[in-house]
Amino acid sequence: MGELNFKYDVLKNDFTCAGEASGKIKRTLKDLGFDSNLIRNVAIAVYEGEINMVIHAEGGVITCDISPECITVTLDDKGPGIPDVDLAMQEGFSTAPDNVRQLGFGAGMGLPNIKKYTDDMVIETQVGVGTKITLKFLVK
Amino acid sequence: MKVKELTEILEGSVIYGEDFLEREVFTACGSDMMSDVLAYVKEQAVLLTGLVNPQVVRTAEMMDMKCIVFVRGKKPDIAMIDLAQEREIPLIGTNMEMFTACGKLYAAGLRGGSGR
């Protein structure tokens, strides 16, 4: 198997469709025969990231690169950026509005959850410009 | 525990998924907060929730959950049922409150996950 690349657009405030991209990545990995635990880790992390993009950003792009050794996902949004990444990484810290909490999110678990399910997470962010999160999942 | 058995214990009704009643669930999770559900992986789990929106079905999908139970008589809308159908996740409805529903299933032998 060589390298495979996928790209998905995520729209701002589209809660109904939030999870479409992560669902597609999940089904693609399943079709390719990856281990089910690995697939679930990717699905959960990307889903949390996708929800974050819908809640906080003006939409963005998710890319997924699949190789036999590693699955790399980037979540690249245009948005407010994260002023204090260490604070955002703390469990329970959230800036999500009330309407998001009513949907079952905004508990301040998004970024900590993403980190928990990935082998490597890099956050590049600029206030007023956007945030790019790169996630790596090693194929063991 | 089979989906069929948990439906009987909860005096529930099948909203979608008559074909999946023989499916086995090993663990359970009761929450209205999807972020908390996503924080702890459970094997072959059933999700009990009072929340009704498409993200409930999506969360269950990402977590490989086997069944969703809506407590307190909550009813999913047609878009949620369609999504559950696409993802082959049975939906059960019960009038029991969350605490009672979880307690009945616990008493019948179902347990939470590892808590990791």
Image (tube, rainbow, N blue to C red):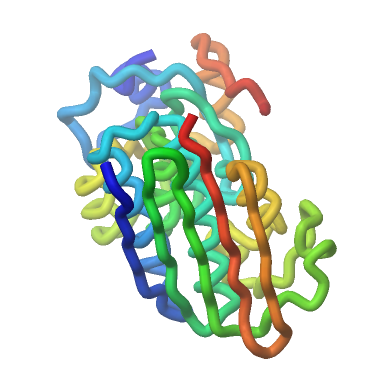
Q: In front here: B101 or A55?
A: A55
User: Residue A33 placed where, x, y %?
Assistant: 28, 33
Q: In front here: A12 or A69?
A: A69
Please indicate whether residue A40 sits to the left or right of residue A119 in the image.
left
**Which residue of the protein is positioned furthest toward the left in this rendering?**
B19
Please indicate whether residue A110 sits to the left or right of residue B4 in the image.
right
Q: Quadrant of the N terminus of chain A?
A: top left
Where residue A92 sits, quadrant-wise, is bottom right
User: Residue B65 placed where, x, y %?
Assistant: 40, 34
Q: Residue at x 43, y 67 (%)?
A: A62
Please indicate whether residue A101 sits to the left or right of residue B104 in the image.
right
Q: Residue at x 35, y 69 (%)?
A: A8
User: Residue A97 placed where, x, y %?
Assistant: 66, 74
Please indicate, yes or no, whether residue B94 appears anywhere in the rendered image: no
Asked if B111 appears above or below A112 in the picture, the reply is: above
**Which residue of the protein is positioned furthest toward the front in this rendering?**
A2
User: Residue A101 placed where, x, y %?
Assistant: 62, 64
Please indicate whether residue A37 sits to the left or right of residue A136 in the image.
left
Q: In front here: B98 or A12?
A: A12
Q: In front here: B104 or A136?
A: A136
Q: Residue at x 67, y 26 (%)?
A: B115
Asked if A56 appears above or below B88 in the picture, the reply is: below
